[in-house]
Image (tube, rainbow, N blue to C red):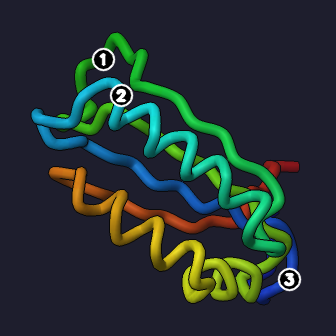
C-alpha cells in the first residue's frame, strides 16, 4: 500500500511559512519569484508550486503560505539543500519568516 522507504522515487519538499508582519507585498513577490527561479539554477529541482491558505477550518496556526518543490529522489533534495543558489536564497528567505515548517515526503497512492 505505501511506497518503499528507499531513496529513489519522487519526493515532495513542502515549506509552510508565516512571514513577519513587516514583509511588504513587493518583498513577498520578490521572495516568491526568487524561490521559483531556483528551478532553473538547481538541476535536481524539477518543479515548484506555491499558494496561500484558503481553508475554512481556521487551523493554520498562523501559517499563510505553502511552497512545494518536486525532486526525483532524496538525493536530489540533498543536492538542493547544499546547492549554493539555494543556500543564498534560503538565508534571505528565512530572514523574512516568523515561523517555518519543512516536510519532505514521498507521495503514495492507496491501492
Report which residue position mark 3 lands on. 8
Which structural element holds mark 3? strand
Q: Residue furthest top?
A: 56
What is the spatial separation of the Cα atoms under label 3 and label 2, in whole angstroms? Answer: 38 Å
Crowding at dot 2, Cα within 10 Å, few <14 / some 14-19 / many 20+, comes out as few
The residue positioned 16% from the left and 51% from the top of the image is: 98
Residue 20 location in percent, x, y?
A: 15, 42
Left or right placement of residue 32 versus residue 93 in this view: right
Report which residue position mark 2 lands on. 26
Of the pair 91 and 15, the residue shown nearer to us:
91
Of the pair 12 and 86, the residue shown nearer to us:
86
The residue positioned 48% from the left and 64% from the top of the image is: 103
The residue positioned 44% from the left and 45% from the top of the image is: 31
Crowding at dot 1, Cα within 10 Å, few <14 / some 14-19 / many 20+, comes out as few
Report which residue position mark 1 lands on. 57
Residue 37 location in percent, x, y?
A: 67, 52
Q: Nearer the viewer, mark 2 or mark 1?
A: 2
Callouts 3 and 2 close, C-beta under 8 Å: no
Left or right placement of residue 80 versus residue 35 in this view: right
On screen, residue 61 above or below 90? above
Q: State the image quarter where residue 84 is shown.
A: bottom right
Q: Earlier in the sequence, mark 3 or mark 1?
A: 3
Residue 11 location in percent, x, y?
A: 73, 67
Of the pair 59 and 67, the residue shown nearer to us:
67
Callouts 2 and 1 close, C-beta under 8 Å: no
Which structural element holds mark 1? loop
Q: Nearer the viewer, mark 3 or mark 1?
A: 3
Which structural element holds mark 2? helix
What is the spatial separation of the Cα atoms under label 2 and label 1, in whole angstroms? Answer: 28 Å
Of the pair 62 and 29, the residue shown nearer to us:
29
Amino acid at each position: 500500500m505505501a511506497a518503499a522507504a528507499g531513496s529513489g522515487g519522487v519526493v515532495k519538499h513542502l515549506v509552510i511559512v508565516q512571514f513577519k508582519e513587516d514583509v511588504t507585498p513587493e518583498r513577498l513577490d520578490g521572495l516568491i519569484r526568487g524561490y521559483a527561479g531556483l528551478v532553473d539554477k538547481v538541476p535536481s529541482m524539477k518543479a515548484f508550486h506555491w499558494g496561500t491558505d484558503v481553508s475554512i477550518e481556521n487551523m493554520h496556526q498562523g501559517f499563510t503560505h505553502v511552497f512545494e518543490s518536486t525532486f526525483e529522489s532524496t538525493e536530489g533534495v540533498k543536492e538542493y539543500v547544499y546547492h549554493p543558489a539555494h543556500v543564498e536564497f534560503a538565508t534571505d528567505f528565512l530572514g523574512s519568516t516568523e515561523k517555518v515548517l519543512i516536510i519532505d515526503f514521498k507521495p503514495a497512492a492507496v491501492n
